[in-house]
Amino acid sequence: MSTNVRRAPAKKALPHPDLREIPVHLVLRALGEPLRLGIVRSLARAGRPMNCSSFGLSVSKSTSTYHFKILRESGVISQFEEGTSRYSELRETELEQRFPGLLTAILATEEPAAAE
Amino acid sequence: MSTNVRRAPAKKALPHPDLREIPVHLVLRALGEPLRLGIVRSLARAGRPMNCSSFGLSVSKSTSTYHFKILRESGVISQFEEGTSRYSELRETELEQRFPGLLTAILATEEPAAAE
DNA sequence: CTCGTACTACGAGATTCAACGTACCACTGC
DNA sequence: GCAGTGGTACGTTGAATCTCGTAGTACGAG
């Protein structure tokens, strides 16, 4: 074969809701859960997509999937698959446009000693 | 008796949590409920204490009490009794100090057609 | 093809939440 | 005193939420 960069990593996007159709109380409810808020904080700190398994959450795999799904369905994060793993990313810009200042205000809050 | 203004209305305050001890996820959860968010919006629009019964909520008395209690316990509102009724007030200034920009950002969101 | 990795979907259990009715208390006005 | 108003507290019920285990899919390495 010509080169060794033949195959791009196959970023497959998953379906995401249109943020214009998300009422603010859904976002608040999604972030009103310590575990999910922690995920969002990590994502914001990282500033780039993160592998689901690199959060070091202390719950089972199926429980993580559940929380990531809620975050995705409430428009807070977007996810795409790359190879064998799934990456999550904060929809920071869109969120800022839809709910100006909201995410910033929440993230500015001090952390209650990150669950390690 | 001497005069008819003898008795001041007897503003009796109720116990409220110290906002410094409220983690942000509690506030988010409290506001992540449409009915409670509606109450907070009304309070913000009024800009002054409101009688519990003047919200015109379409739930039973005991349910209102329940939601007001949650808002009070999560530090969002304060309540005091005056005569025979109880008034609620947004803890706007304290909230702004504890979580700068948060309440503003939330209230700036358009309302999904106020439940009438 | 087989194995291991990374994650999902489904079903089940425990806990929490939202709504209600009833009973009750404090105050007002008659 | 007695009734009415405005609200709480308690117990209950149904729904939603959170958690997990199991089974299964999709991919990459060998």
Image (spheres, coloured by chain):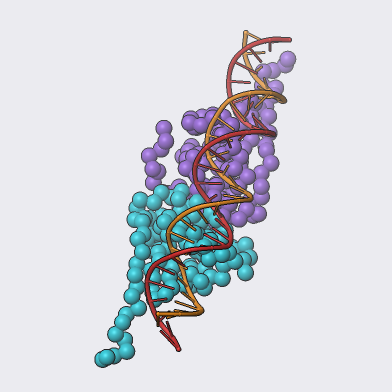
Chain colours: A cyan, B purple, C orange, D red
**Taking B96 as reference, is A48 left or right?**
left
Residue A97: x and y in percent read 37, 58
- Among the 4 quarters of the image, the one containing residue A95: bottom left
- Residue farthest left in this picture: A2
Residue A89: x and y in percent read 43, 67
**Taking B74 as reference, is A41 left or right?**
left
Q: Quadrant of the N terminus of chain A?
A: bottom left
Residue depicted at 48% across the width and 31% down the height: B58
Q: Quadrant of the C terminus of chain A?
A: bottom right
The residue closer to the viewer here, B9 or B103, is: B103
Residue D15: x and y in percent read 49, 41
**Taking B57 as reference, is D12 left or right?**
right
- Residue farthest bottom in this picture: A2
Q: Is residue D29 above or below residue A82?
A: below
Residue depicted at 36% across the width and 59% down the height: A16
The residue closer to the viewer here, D16 or B35, is: D16
Residue depicted at 64% across the width and 29% down the height: B82
**Taking D21 as reference, is B44 left or right?**
left
The residue closer to the viewer here, C11 or B28, is: C11
The residue closer to the viewer here, A75 or B52, is: A75
Residue depicted at 43% across the width and 55% down the height: A74
Q: Is residue B99 visible?
A: no
Residue A24: x and y in percent read 43, 50
